[in-house]
Image (cartoon, rainbow, N blue to C red):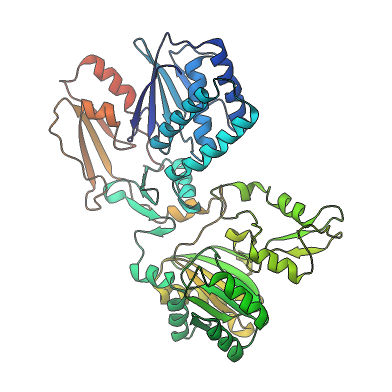
Amino acid sequence: MMKIQFQAIEGYAYGAIQPSTIFRFSVNEVLPSDHVDELVKLFSTVTISHATDIFEYEDVTHGPNHAPTLLIGILAALTQHSGDRRLSTIKAFSEGDTVVYALPTLSTDMTWHTLIALSKFLKDTNYNSTEAQVSEFLNGLKSSNRKFLPGGTNTMNFLNAAAQHKIPFKIFRQNYLILGYASGSTILKSSITDQETSIGVSLARSKVDTNRLLKLSGLPVPDQARIQTITQAKHFAGEFGYPVVLKPEDESQGRGIYANIRDEKELIWCFEQVANTYPILLIEKHITGDHYRIDFMGGELIKAVRRRPPEVVGDGIRTLRELIAELNLDPERLDPYSSKKIVVLDEDLKRCIKKQQVSLDDVLETKRTIYLKSISNLSRGGDQIHVEDDIHPENFKLCQMIARTMRLDVLGIDLLSPDLSKPWHSNGTVVCEVNAQPQLGASGTDVYWRFMKNYLRPPVRIEVEVTNDTSQSQAPLFDTEVSRLKIKLSVADAFSQGCPVQYFQDFKIADDVAAADRRRLERLFVSVNPEGA
């Protein structure tokens, strides 16, 4: 492996709107031809689905087999393969007898981890890997790198929206996204904003509290009980009748739910599947109707969809298993930051297809439809259709009442209804659940920007000065009482950390800074102004 100087910059550098990893190579760096051949082969393998025109060169000699360019290109592709997002180009430039590459990344730790893993892979395979070894390496790297990136669907999509509109962002502990600075800053945790009430979020986390509060308020909810034994489950079913639903008291994304349980034998079987994992369960009356998710923000509609359990249609040629495998090739299901997931061959699926008297290895006759799950959550493989234009005004008012009752500004409301275009009080519509952290949709939609801009605050004025004085204190970057930031950095801190802010109106370099350092600072500090600033 070639000699590399590695540096992680958690601030902003060279016009990137995310952290950067800096690599320095000698201008005379060369590799044996067999090493270059292996890098070329690996580069072609990992860049199949990634753009290769990701470099911005300045005073750097390069070519298709230039060793440093190959290595940085592979690292860029490997981190992107693992879920990283390249929101700025890779800058390449000269500093004396050194070639510098600034690789933007969402996680400098992940880039370092990837570099170490790549070095070990090349050494272990003696620069002569097989296709199987490359495939195993890529799969293992993707799995181990996930811990470095933001979790959940919403956070990454909010981040993409912020980048598109040049809104400054900081990822904090993988769960929080900080937008802007000082009095212009906002913090998101998934779709929970810093303007939300803790009471509302706490209430919505409990399905029991939600059901009872809404019932107390005269709003329609299904009959429900908390249970711990099968005897209690049987008693509920005997009192309210079948079908019923079993679900965990404190779980999300449809995990552990068994719906449309139609008799005692099936109830016992479903109870046994979940009782060991969830000691406390909820049982409620199964309501016939479609499952609608209504996402609200500030009393206004974000989106409305009718959710459907996953299904396949027979063609008289392929087995059910093969049809499910094809369904799971949907790019939206394979996107790690999409709400819609693949269909897993779990116990609920086996139960559903058994009811329809078919097995995984049966060839389905042409046009026969098979439903694969008892629930319609996207996280369980379900699908959805937008129905914003179908909501009856009375149902819109119902959702507004729910939001006010739950003390929530942002929420996802699950309704079970035979027809959302009819008033809720005319057809037995009920509120199934309320989610204080709704997943807003697929990657690439504009819903995230429409959501985000409602909570962004006006950007503050920022002045940055770099000096040789090392006695500077930390600026209050996220103090919401501060309307103007004055940031002073030492030269050493500037080179090691980059600029702490993405944009600034004034940038000064003190007279005590040497000319050579001044030139480097002018290249390092680039303001990227947010949209509308």
User: Which residue reaches farthest top?
Assistant: 28
Residue 336, position as x, y percentages in the image: 55, 47
Name the image quarter holding residue 162.
Answer: top left
Q: Residue at x 60, y 86 (%)?
A: 237
Depicted 505 relative to depicted 340: above or below: above
Q: Nearer the viewer, residue 3 or 514?
A: 3
Quadrant the C terminus occupies? top left
Q: Nearer the viewer, residue 148 or 214?
A: 148
Q: Residue at x 58, y 25 (%)?
A: 42
Depicted 332 relative to depicted 243: above or below: above
Residue 181, position as x, y percentages in the image: 30, 46
Depicted 53 relative to depicted 419: above or below: above
Please give left or right for residue 162 compared with residue 292 in the image. left
Please give left or right for residue 388 compared with residue 252 in the image. right
Q: Residue at x 41, y 38 (%)?
A: 107
Residue 384, position as x, y percentages in the image: 64, 61
Q: Nearer the viewer, residue 255 or 327?
A: 255
User: Which residue reaches farthest bottom?
Assistant: 239
Residue 134, position as x, y percentages in the image: 59, 30
Q: Is residue 64 visible?
A: no
How many tags in the picture? Answer: 0
Q: Is residue 470 visible?
A: yes
Depicted 305 relative to depicted 211: above or below: above
Q: Nearer the viewer, residue 381 or 487?
A: 381
Name the image quarter holding residue 256.
Answer: bottom right
